[in-house]
Image (cartoon, rainbow, N blue to C red):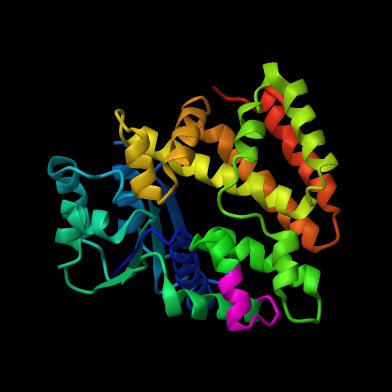
Amino acid sequence: MILLVYGDDAFRVKERAKEFVMKFAEKFDPTRMNIDEFVFGKKDDAQLPRVSEAIAASPFLSPKRMVRVDGIFSTVTTKPDAEPWIAMFSRVPESTIVVLVDTVSKEKVEKTELWKRVSGMKDVHVYPLPALSGLDLQAWVVGRAKIHGVTMVPNVISVLVDRVGNDSWRLETEIGKLAAYAGDAPVTEAMITKLVVSEYREDIFVLMDAMSADRAPYALQKLHEERVAGADEFPLFGMLVRQIRILLQVRALCDERSNIGKGDVAEVLGLHPFVAQKVLGEARRRSFLQMMAWHGLAAELDSAMKRGLAADVAVDRLVAMMLDDSSILR
């Protein structure tokens, strides 16, 4: 069996893939000894034999095994590169469940030779997850709010979406933050105004431009100015996290296409042209590993804030890492 999970709604794609893995573990393999996961950051010919070996292996003390592969459609893009993968996927044994995951657009995935050939094979199930909009987006926000244990009525949801857009990763972060702030009360428009920063804000670029070792004093000065001006720590943290996620997406695009321009970034990620120009220059100065380290710390701090960590401490720790010479893996 092969499951294809893809689309530019990265949060829902990752959640669906995670759900498949968790259900597999519950049903077949609580020890998770029969689950292998592979991630493509860029083209890597060495991945093919490793993935092939994992797929062909016999399950250990279980009737099934699972192999998850992330980023394959955006990496294996040409017909010659796709052929050996197609041949390998055509021989998946009945005892193996393969999950192919990618967070690029539905249209781009379905143009690849790999998708065209694999999707037509026997026992293949396709799960496209494009970015949501309109009533579908509202319904999704209602569902996530319930998961976080908070109530959000339609007019409040509209205010949130107006400020955040349809970025499901950021919506999930903001809903969690609002739920922690609201407690047992419903989320109000006033809470959103207080805690959620609008999708487009130029100030963050001034701070992010200073996030290099030789400009650390200037970056700390800008952070101080934000606080003196009355910036709330929660949205300030959210601003930094959102910028890190955008930089990661742009860095991945740079690795995928050597001649990418701001127009491509604006089109693929749905960014304002000014934003696209700024983040493209910043992403080119940073390494993918460096920004993944930032993102990992941000996730830990977000979880810690929900358990009581002060937001200003979270902001300080994240900024400290971003300014630390040892975290810059150029």
Residue at 66%, 26% (x, y): give it.
210
Q: Quadrant of residue 325?
A: top right
Quadrant (top left/top right/bottom left/bottom right) for the N terminus = bottom left
Q: Nearer the viewer, residue 15 or 173?
A: 173
User: Can residue 47 be seen here?
Assistant: yes
Residue at left 50%, top 59%? 167
Please give left or right for residue 79 compared with residue 209 in the image.
left
Q: Answer left or right for 43 relative to 313.
A: left
Residue at the spot 65% in from the left edge and 63% down from the top edge:
174
Q: In the image, which residues are magenta?
A: 148-159
| 213 vs 34, nearest the viewer | 213
Establish if 198 lies above or below 313.
Answer: below
Residue 155 spot, x, y in % from top left:
60, 79
Q: How many marks?
A: 0
In the foreground, 1 or 276: 276
Is residue 156 highlighted in magenta? Answer: yes
Spot occupied by residue 307 in the image (x, y as percentages of width and height): 82, 63
Residue 31: tell me if it is visible.
no
Tell whether position 2 is magenta.
no
Residue 197 lies, in percent from the top left, at 66, 55
Answer with the quarter of the image where residue 320 lies: top right
Give the quarter of the figure containing the C terminus: top right
User: In the drawing, does residue 121 fall left or right of residue 242?
Assistant: left
Q: Position of residue 228 (x, y in %)?
A: 85, 40
Q: Is residue 41 above or below residue 156?
A: above
Which is nearer the eye, 160 or 90?
Answer: 160
Q: Residue at x 16, y 68 (%)?
A: 121
